[in-house]
Image (cartoon, helix red, strand yellow):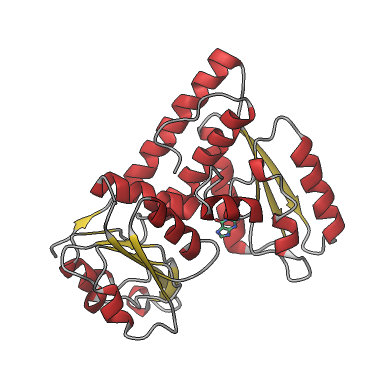
Amino acid sequence: MAAEIIDGKAFAADVRGRVAQHVAELKSVHDIVPGLAVVLVGEDPASQVYVRNKHAQTIEAGMESFEHRLPADTPQNELLDLIEQLNTDSRVHGILVQLPLPPHLNSELVINAIAPAKDVDGFHISNVGLLGTGQKSMVPCTPLGCLMLLRDRLGSLSGKDAVVIGRSNIVGKPMAQLLLRDSCTVTIAHSRTKDIEEVCRRADILIAAVGRPEMVTGEFVKPGATVIDVGINRIPAPEKGEGKMRLVGDCHFESCAEVAGAITPVPGGVGPMTIACLLANTLTACCRAHRLPEPEGLTA
Ligand code: GUN
């Protein structure tokens, strides 16, 4: 194996430490405590795990955490009323509505009801537009985490060939916008892309965000490239025992690592960066709300 393994777990711990330090300063100098509200509708088991982790890490960073757990059959108007209440609550600087929402709720309407300045997911249409036009916005957490890892390893990204596999609103599209803003030459590849292996082999930076277990093999990777694996897929692991599962990324780790210069593992790569960046975004939103300088190195 040739590639350096990018330790997202350690990097995320460092980000959380820097956030906690800023939070402590805000408290002692300005008597301000950043607050994050997380709204969970229904009982989706994966969402419950995420929300529990978010709560614990928010508290650990010294912030206030407001959790709102609503039943799966909550009417849309009730959810919108709660968001309106959080929009006007001065203790709340960030609002996150955990996705996916139950099918009777209109996710777009709900997300667009969040005050853009408190939209720490960066999913509100205003933030999407601001990012696309190169203006100051809230940036989606997972792409922000990938960008931090890339800048840390590569320094300037200017002039690099970047290929993003996947065109989701949560990762692929905002990732491409961020790379473009850092002056990469950006290609978005997806399920209909012709000769996808060849397209990917041009990339100095390859971001895999398709949600297909181990789809990206060493054949997709240019020698020396930096590979960022955003996928988190659970697949059967009969070698661990009957009914057991294991986590894999969108990249086939062993074959990619033989060719790449550096690669993020799954687990322990991009995953831990997402919540760290959520905390960073909440701190940023709090600083902006109070017209204080933004923390350096924790924004896009
Ligand atoms: N569900 C899975 N990932 C995310 C995320 O980044 N934000 C929200 N709101 N829900 C999610």
Residue at the spot 47% in from the left edge and 54% down from the top edge: 142
Q: Quadrant of the N terminus?
A: bottom left
Q: Is residue 58 left or right of residue 93?
A: left
The answer to whether 166 is drawn above or below residue 204 in the figure is below
Q: Quadrant of ligand 1?
A: bottom right
Residue 244: x %, y % from top left: 43, 73
Residue 127: x %, y % from top left: 60, 50
The answer to whether 164 is drawn above or below residue 276 in the figure is below
Q: Is residue 115 left or right of residue 147?
A: right
The answer to which of 242 and 98 lies nearer the viewer is: 98
Q: Is residue 69 left or right of residue 293?
A: right
Please state the total of marks drawn on the protein image.
Answer: 0
The answer to which of 241 and 47 lies nearer the viewer is: 47
Residue 59: x %, y % from top left: 56, 34
Does residue 63 show up? no
Residue at the spot 24% in from the left edge and 49% down from the top edge: 154
Residue 184: quarter of image? bottom left
The answer to which of 184 and 239 lies nearer the viewer is: 184
Q: Is residue 279 left or right of residue 217?
A: right
Q: Quadrant of the C terminus?
A: top left
The answer to which of 149 and 267 lies nearer the viewer is: 149
Residue 268: x %, y % from top left: 35, 54
Does residue 16 show up? yes
Instruction: Single out the residue that lies furthest toward the left.
Output: 2
Instruction: Single out the residue that lies furthest toward the top.
Output: 29
